[in-house]
Amino acid sequence: MYSKEQILKALSKVIHPGRGTDIVALGIVSDIISDDNGISLTITPEKSNDPFISSIKSTIVKTLKEVLGPNAVINDIKVLPKIIVGKQVEKQREVLPGVTNIVAVSSGKGGVGKTTIAVNLAISLARLGYSVGLLDADVYGPSVPKMFHEEKYRPEVKRENNTDFIIPLTKYGVKVLSTGFFVDPAEAVIWRGPMASNFLKQLITQGEWGILDFLLVDLPPGTSDIHLTLVQEVPVTGAIVVTTPQDVALADAIKGISMFRSEKINVPVLGLVENMSWFTPAELPSNKYYIFGKEGGKKLAEKMKVPLLGQIPLVQSICEGSDNGEPVALNDSVTGSAFLKLAEELIKSVNERNKEQKPTVKLQVNK
C-alpha cells in the first residue's frame, strides 16, 4: 500500500503534452485510493475531447510502476471531464458523454474479416490498459456474439429517470452490445432500413457505456443507412477500413475511404488494415504464401495517402479463436502480437488526428 503523497509525487513526473505542465500542478488528479487491491484514481481534464487523455493514462501507468516499483498494481484510472458551460460542449454531452474516441470499423465488401479485426482490436486495446467498448452495428449479420462465445447472452435493462438503459456484456475487458443479443441466432433479421437504424440508435443512446477511451463500431460491409445513422447520431473520431490484398476487395475499399472523406460525411480515415495478407501454415511458421496477392493494401494506402495500420496474416488460429469464442488477441502468440501492434498503431493515429484536426461534428440532416 502506498501513501497519497507517494502517488502524487510520482504523478508529478507525468507531463500533459499539450500544456507542458505536470498533471498534479494542473489540478486534474483526484480521488486517489490506495489499498491492498492496488491504486485507483480519477483525472478530470478541462476538455471532454482532450486528445492527450489516452497517452496520459498510459504514461500514468508506466510512471507509477517506474517510481513505486514494478509490483505496483494500478486498478483503475477513471476520466471525468470537467463540465464547461458552452453550446458546443453541451451538444457533445447529449450522447455518449463519457466516450473519448469513437472509431468506425468498416469494409468495402463482406468476407474480408472486418468483424474479426474489430473484435481482436478491441481486446488488444483493453490489454494495453484502455477502457473499451464494442458496438456491433452489423444489424443484419451480427457475428460478434459468437466470437465472444455469448450467443445466449441477453442484456439486462435498468430504468433510470424514466429511461431504460441497456447493460452491455463485459468480457475480456470489453463492453459489448450487439443485435445478436436480442434475436434468435437461427433466425434471419428481416428489417426495413428505418427499423434497423432506429435499433442502432437505441443501442447507442440507451446503452450504458459509461467512461470509455475507445468505442469501436463494427459497421456492415459496404455503405448503407447504418453508416449514415452513425454519423448523424455521434461525432465519429475516425474510421479504419479493412481489406484484403485482392483486387476486388481493394476496389471496394477505395469506395469506403471515399465515402468517409466525402464533403457530406467528412470523417477522418485513420488508416487501412490489410487482412489475410499472407498464409502461414502452422507446421511452417516462417513461410509466407501470398494467395490473395502481395501488398495490395500497402500500395492502396500509399495511393490514398492513409496510414497502413497493420498487415494481419491468414492463419488457422485466428479462425479457430473466432469460432471458439477465444479470440487470438487474448494470448501472446505471433498473431496475438500482430493485433497488439495494430492497436498501438491505431492509438498513434488517433492521437495524431486529435492533435492536428478539429473534433468531428455530427452530420446534420435538413428535413
Image: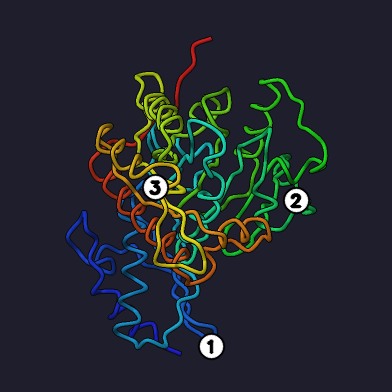
Q: Sort mark 2 into few (<14), some (14-19) or many (20+) by Cα contacts within 10 Å.
A: some
Question: What's the distance in space between the residues labelled 3 and 2, CA to CA?
Answer: 28 Å
Vertical arrangement, residue 40 with respect to residue 166, above or below: below
Decide if residue 70 is on the left or right side of residue 9. right
Q: Quadrant of the C terminus?
A: top right
Numbered label attached to residue 323: none
Vertical arrangement, residue 300 with respect to residue 367, above or below: below
Mark 3 or mark 2: name the one nearer the start of the chain.
3
Residue at the spot 34% in from the left edge and 62% down from the top edge: 28
Residue 7 picture location, percent across and down: 35, 81
Numbered label attached to residue 48: 3
Residue 75 picture location, percent across and down: 50, 75
Q: Nearest the camera: 212 or 183?
A: 183
Question: What's the distance in space between the residues labelled 2 and 1, CA to CA?
Answer: 32 Å
Q: Which quadrant would residue 64 be assigned to in this image?
A: bottom left
Decide if residue 144 is on the left or right side of residue 110. right
- State yes or no: discs 3 and 2 in contact (Cβ < 8 Å): no
Residue at the spot 49% in from the left edge and 82% down from the top edge: 38
Question: What's the distance in space between the residues labelled 3 and 1, CA to CA?
Answer: 31 Å
Numbered label attached to residue 155: 2
- Write down the residue under mark 1: 36
